[in-house]
Image: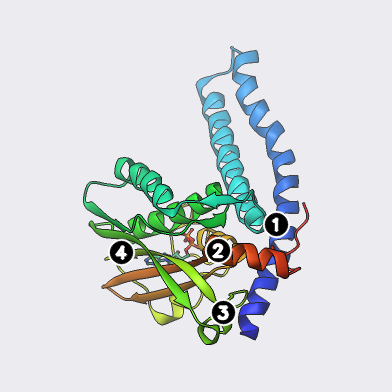
Amino acid sequence: LEAQFLRAQRLESLGTLSAGIAHDMNNILTPILAVSQLLPLKLPQLDANMLRLLQVMEDSAHRGAALVKQILAFARGVEGNRTTVKVDELLTEVTQILQQTLPKTIQIAVDCRDDLEPVYGDVTQLHQVLMNLSVNARDAMPHGGKLQITAEMQTLDSTTAQMHIEAKPGLYIVIGVKDTGMGMSPEVLDRIFDPFFTTKAMGQGTGLGLSAVLGIVNSHGGFIDAQSEVVRGTSFRLFLPAYQVAAGVIEHDDDFPPGHQE
Ligand code: ADP
């Protein structure tokens, strides 16, 4: 439990720090991007070689800007605009996007009860959580496979809840994201939530996807259970408190959501 607490604290201070860096970085990148786009227009006599170099500069600045955006999304994980969210609607929305964007070799199966209690959360953040997990699942199944998304309800008693930081006993919505991909060794599994930890090739992964997922789920008063087996696949289960439980947490716990200032 203490380890979880320290991890949450570490994530939070890292969030504050990285938001500051990302903000400065944005100010640095903006003129680089603007100049690399403007020069070819202002100087029509530039030769092809020069134009190519400017294109390299522009592409690089774009990549930097995309990274900054991801860092900010991770840093904002602790805030958000909360409303009651219907998980079945969220899953329908995400599934539609996945059906259009994932390779056809990946079969998507959704199994969601339609009588789920709502959660109290930020739709955009929860959307991002499911997309991050699904994109990881896609990356783990380069030769195709099955992506299974489920949602059900589960009541946690106080003993089970105590094993997880910030978790209160009561009703939880459990969202499962399961793939039949390459899986992970226990050593990798142990580090997946560390910011910047990635096993992907340079430029393919930032190592921020799951840190953002964890930050968002924790700030919703929830927790994550991750299991994986090499070659067989990986299964994430997100426990999000149902609306009543979450509202109780917010009313009675001064630390919820964990204090975070821009
Ligand atoms: P990134 O995807 O940018 O590497 P993440 O934080 O999302 O960053 O993931 C960290 C690492 O966790 C990945 O590089 C990968 O090694 C591992 N991982 C995450 N999801 C899965 C999955 N579904 N199957 C196998 N490995 C995974």
Residue 31, x across and y down, in percent: 71, 32
Disc 3 and disc 2 in contact, CB within 8 angstroms? no
- Per the image, the residue denoted by label 4 is 179
Are dots 3 and 4 in contact, CB under 8 Å?
A: no
Query: Circle 3 — which element?
Result: loop
Disc number placed over residue 217 in the picture, else none: 2
What residue is drawn where x is 33% and y is 65%? 178
Disc number lying in front (3 or 4): 3
Question: Where on the picture, by quarter, is residue 175?
Answer: bottom left
**Badge 1: residue crowd in 10 Å (few <14, some 14–19, many ≥20):** some
Question: Which quadrant of the frame does ligand 1 lie within?
Answer: bottom left
At label 1, the amino acid type is Ser
Instruction: Name the element at disc 4.
Output: strand
Structural distance between the alpha carbons of marks 4 and 2: 20 Å
Q: Earlier in the sequence, mark 3 or mark 1?
A: 1
4 or 2: mark nearer the eye: 2
Q: Is residue 188 above or below residue 97?
A: below
First along the sequence among labels 2 and 1: 1
C-alpha gap between disc 3 and disc 4:
24 Å
x and y, in percent, of residue 144 in the image: 23, 56
Identify the mark at residue 164; answer none if there is no mark: 3
Q: CA distance from mark 3 to mark 1?
A: 26 Å
